Structures are given as C-alpha cells and as structure tokens.
C-alpha cells in the first residue's frame, strides 16, 4: 500500500545541498521561459517540480545537466551548482557533468539497435571499454537497482524495445544507473505509462533516493505528493513556492499554489 | 437502427460511388506498376532472344575480338566491377561524411540552406557535364590519366549528391530522443553519432547507396568523355590502368556494321543487367541484415 496523499510523517531532516539553482533565467530564441529561479535541492532526497504545461519545468530540469543548451537557439543565465561547483563554469565539460547527473525522459527511449544488456551498458560502452565479468556485474547491479532484473535476467540478449512500456522505462533507469551518477533527473517519467507501471516506478524512486539525489518533473500532483520530499511549484517561468512536500500540499503559503493544488486551474 | 441506415438508398449510392472510385484508383495503381514491369520484361526478352545464343561461360571469360563469335566481355565486366568498388570507396565515405556534417554538426544558417539547395541542383546535372569535369580535373590537372581511378572519381562525383541527400534523409529519421538519451549518458557527439545514430540510419543509407551505385554502373557518357577505351585485350591490373566498362563495350558493339556484333551487344546487355541484379541483391541482403539487427 502506498502512503496516503496527505501523509503526516515528520518532515525529512535537512541534508546538505546537492544542486543549487541561483537566479536562473532561460530563453528559447527571444522567448524567455524561466525568470530567475532560486532553489536549493538537498542531497539524497526527492524533489518534485510541478506546474501546468508550459510553465518551464522541463526547461528547468534540463538546465541542471546542461541538456537545455543542446536545443538550437537556447541560452541560459544565472548559476547552477553541483556540490558547490558551477556546472556552467568555463572548465566544466558538459559530457563529464552528464555522467554525474543522469536523466530519464518522458517517453521510454531504449536504443532500438541494442539488446537489453547492451542498453544497460550503453553509457559505459559509449565512453570506455569494459571487460566481460565487470560488464555482467554492472548489468545485474543496474537492473536490480531499477527493479527489472527478475523480469529480464533470462533474456538479456533480446532487444530492449521488445519490453513493455513500463519495463522499457525501468530499462532506461537502469541504463542511467549503470553510469553511476549522483543525481537522477526524471522528466515526467510516468506520463507514457499505465497506473500499474507508474506505481512500480514510484516504488522504485522511494528506494533510489537512499543512494541518489532525485529531481522529478511531473504534471501529476498526486504523484508529487506520493514520491517527493520537497516540491517546487512553477508558474509561467517563476518559482511560486518551494518547500517540504507535506507543507506545500497541506498549508501552501501562496494562494496560487493553493488554487493549483486544489484544482482551480492547470 | 444501424441496419436501417446501412440499407438506406442514399447511403447505398454513396457507398457504391465510393466503391467505384476505390476500384478505379486500384486499377490505376496496378496499371502503373504493370506498365514499367512489362517494358522491362519486353526489353529483357528481346535481348535474351537476340543474344541468348552468344551467352556462355566463354563469352564472359573472353577478350574482345575482331571476329564477332570469338568476342567476349571479360575486360568490360572486370572494369565495371572495379569501377563500382572504387566509386563506392570514394563516394560513400565522402557522401555520408558530408551528410553527417550537415545534419549533426552544421547549424541552421543561410549558408547551410545554400549548400542544401546546391546539392539538390547537382543531383540534376547531366552526366556528360560530370564527364567533362572529370576529364579536365582528374585526367588532365591531377594527371590520373585515362585510368580506372579517373573513371571512378568521375562516377563518384556524379553519385555524390544523391548519396548526400539520401544519407541526410536517413539521419533525419533517427528520433531526437535517442540522441538526447545518449547525451544524457555522458556520450560525446561523435560517440552518439557512431554508436546510436548511424546503426539506425545504416539501412536507409545503404538503400541510397544501392540506387546511386546502380546508376553509376550504367553510366556511359562520362566514361566516354574521360576516355575509357573501347577495345582492350587485358584486364586492368591497378587503379592507374586503362580500362573499359560494360556499357562502353556494348556501345562499341552496337556501332559496328556487322550484324553479328549486335548479337554480342545483346548478350552484353544481359551480362550488365545480371551484374546489376547480383550487386543489388547483395546490397539488399546486407541491408536486411542490418535492419534486423537494428529493430
């Protein structure tokens, strides 16, 4: 049984800041989508970013691992820090940053030309060579980490795309875990999945936060309430409220937050 | 209710009218596939009837001769195969490389659009123009001489625009999400292209390569211009050797006054078509294997 939506567990102990977002503004061409966001994302916790479509939540999460800049015409100002280091600093290689900050996308996107095993190892194979026993070990650890091992251990050589949607998404999580990141970004990871697959991913998020710092974008408020320790509410590119999830959902400080979580708009 | 509607007169009429147009379109589509196939069959039957008598292993393994019934196609066949191989070696890396640059690295700009339009235009330039370019550039300025290398370079230029266009199409079909997935795993752009994008694009690229090379093997005009020989009694022994090719040999035989050489020409056409079929078959087999791996 999953915890109730408005649970009354004690607030999580404050932990050190993993990701710092400082006055972040982002543009696509001349269109500004983020207007100065400030957030401190604590280590080994789940932070949910909620808000209506087009509020900039995807842009915000994509700026954390510098995926935002891959879009043509995209630019960003402000500071984002990982363990206190500016990830947009001159000597920071975005490629190395993305090995520390993994990402799971909205639509499950296993590599179609690869088997389940090769998908898990893709991130490692893309970047270095692996010996066989180490590869087998990493495959198992990552698939266990993504709660997929028992379902696929007998067919690791079948194509990754032969799995169901929910399994594919867990495969994508395993693929991210195999690179051993510190932060896992999830951009609406369940929006293409059915309720059963969704609840498995949510359970998984609960387990993963003991090891990783997780940031999850979701348009589903119940999901944010279920899985996250902290919630950020974004509206038209501005951070309306950022606090512990319990507090945000039970006693929001801003009326706009209250209107949104009670379903008056969105 | 729905039964009544189905049999109501207006619906029935509309349905029948729909059926007629459906059938008419089907017939039209069928006709447009039967017509070209029939033409091809008539041509093949014609050359088989004319040249069938000369078709033999001897014909394939003999050198041209002044006596029509001793003449063979060996130098032309070998020359064409060499040409194909060399053309592929030159045109495919260049063409795919250009496509990768334009699709994956190049930013959208006025310059890139200009390049795009020009490549499309190049694909429509008559082959004789490429022949003249080859004669000036490869044979004379670069001193390749009237060699296989000059011929293959010219044919490579000829098919390059097509290879670029088709490769770009193939690269464009790779979903953006897969590239992002690779980047998010900490892959560099080159790693992403080589290990994620290209494996998915290969079948499409190969289809384009097949079409382009089929065109190259049938080309005569540019080879005549750069000076492929029409009567050689040896097989080329290197990329700098003089050469002839199947279409040139056929062209040569057709223009002889003696009737007997027409028979040789027909037999030569059969060899050319068979060679093309075999090469295409191999390429399609390779593509299907790649496709199976990719899906």
Image (spheres, grey):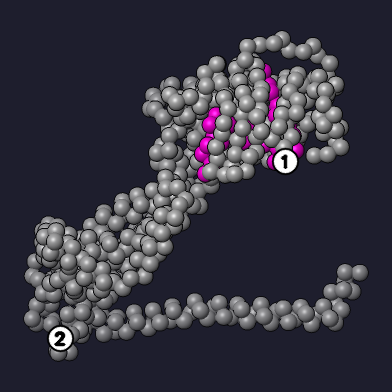
Q: Give x and y (percent) for residue B40.
A: 39, 79
Residue at disc 1, secondary structure: loop
Residue A48 vertical placement versus B117 (above, below): above
Residue B64 vertical placement versus B159 (above, below): below
Q: Which residues are magenta?
A: A45-72
Residue A197 at least partly seen: no
Query: Is B78 positioned to the left or the right of B38 in the image?
Result: left
Residue A199 vertical placement versus B59 (above, below): above
**Mark 2 touching mark 1, by CB under 8 A?**
no
Q: Give x and y (percent) for residue A65.
A: 55, 29
Residue A220 at least partly seen: yes
Query: Is B96 positioned to the left or the right of A38 in the image?
Result: left
Query: Is B175 positioned to the left or the right of A46 in the image?
Result: left
Quote the CA–CA distance across marks 2 and 1: 76 Å
* Residue shown at the point (61%, 20%) measured from the top left: A20
Q: Give x and y (percent) for residue B171.
A: 45, 51
Q: Chain of mark 2?
A: B
Most foreground residue, A110 or A132: A110
Query: Is A180 positioned to the left or the right of A48 in the image?
Result: left
Q: Quadrant of the C terminus of chain A?
A: top right
Most foreground residue, A241 or B41: A241
The mark closer to the camera, 2 or 1, is 1
* Residue shown at the point (72%, 26%) measured from the top left: A232
Would you name the residue on which mark 2 appears? B256
Question: Mark 2, residues whose alpha carbon is within 10 Å: few (<14), some, or many (≥20)?
Answer: few
Q: Chain of mark 1?
A: A
Would you name the residue on which mark 1 appears? A53
């Amino acid at each position: 049984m999953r915890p109730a939506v408005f649970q009354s567990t004690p607030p999580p102990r404050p932990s050190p800041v993993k990701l710092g977002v400082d006055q972040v503004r982002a543009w696509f061409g001349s269109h500004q989508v983020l207007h100065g966001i400030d957030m401190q994302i604590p280590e080994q916790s789940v932070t949910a970013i909620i808000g209506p479509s087009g509020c900039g939540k995807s842009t915000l999460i994509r700026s954390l691992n510098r995926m935002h800049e891959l879009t043509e015409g995209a630019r960003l100002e402000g500071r984002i820090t990982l363990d206190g280091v500016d990830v947009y600093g001159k000597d920071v290689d975005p490629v190395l940053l993305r090995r520390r900050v993994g990402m799971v996308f909205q639509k499950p996107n296993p590599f179609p030309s690869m088997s389940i095993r090769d998908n898990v190892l893709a991130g490692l194979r893309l970047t270095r060579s692996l010996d066989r026993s180490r590869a087998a070990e990493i495959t198992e650890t990552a698939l266990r980490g993504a709660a997929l091992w028992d379902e696929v251990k007998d067919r690791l050589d079948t194509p990754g795309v032969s799995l169901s949607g929910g399994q594919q998404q867990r495969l994508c999580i395993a693929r991210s875990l195999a690179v051993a990141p510190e932060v896992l970004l999830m951009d609406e990871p369940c929006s293409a999945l059915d309720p059963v697959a969704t609840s498995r991913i949510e359970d998984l998020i609960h387990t993963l936060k003991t090891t990783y710092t997780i940031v999850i974008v979701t348009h589903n408020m119940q999901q944010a309430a279920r899985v996250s320790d902290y919630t950020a509410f974004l509206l038209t590119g501005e951070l309306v409220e950022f606090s512990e999830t319990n507090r945000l959902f039970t006693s929001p400080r801003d009326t706009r937050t209250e209107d949104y979580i009670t379903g008056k708009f969105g | 209710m729905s039964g009544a509607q189905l049999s109501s007169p207006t619906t029935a009429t509309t349905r029948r009218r729909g059926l007629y147009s459906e059938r008419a379109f089907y017939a039209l589509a069928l006709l447009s596939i039967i017509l070209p196939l029939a033409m091809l069959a008539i041509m093949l039957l014609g050359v088989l009837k004319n040249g069938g008598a000369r078709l033999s292993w001897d014909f394939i393994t003999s050198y041209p001769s002044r006596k029509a019934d001793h003449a063979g196609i060996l130098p032309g066949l070998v020359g064409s195969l060499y040409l194909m191989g060399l053309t592929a070696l030159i045109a495919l890396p260049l063409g795919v490389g250009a496509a990768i640059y334009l699709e994956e690295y190049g930013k959208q700009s006025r310059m890139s659009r200009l390049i795009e339009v020009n490549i499309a235009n190049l694909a429509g330039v008559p082959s004789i123009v490429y022949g003249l370019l080859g004669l000036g550039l490869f044979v004379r300025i670069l001193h390749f001489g009237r060699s296989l290398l000059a011929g293959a370079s010219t044919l490579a230029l000829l098919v390059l625009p097509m290879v670029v266009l088709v490769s770009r199409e193939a690269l464009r079909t790779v979903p953006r999400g897969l590239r992002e997935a690779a980047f998010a795993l900490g892959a560099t752009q080159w790693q992403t292209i080589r290990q994620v994008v290209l494996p998915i694009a290969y079948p499409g690229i190969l289809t384009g390569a097949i079409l382009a090379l089929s065109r190259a093997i049938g080309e005569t005009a540019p080879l005549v211009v750069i000076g492929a020989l029409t009567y050689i009694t040896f097989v080329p022994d290197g990329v700098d050797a003089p050469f002839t090719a199947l279409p040139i040999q056929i062209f040569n035989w057709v223009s002889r006054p003696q009737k007997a050489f027409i028979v040789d020409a027909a037999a030569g056409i059969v060899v050319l078509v068979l060679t093309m079929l075999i090469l295409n078959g191999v390429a399609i087999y390779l593509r299907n294997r790649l496709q199976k791996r990719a899906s």
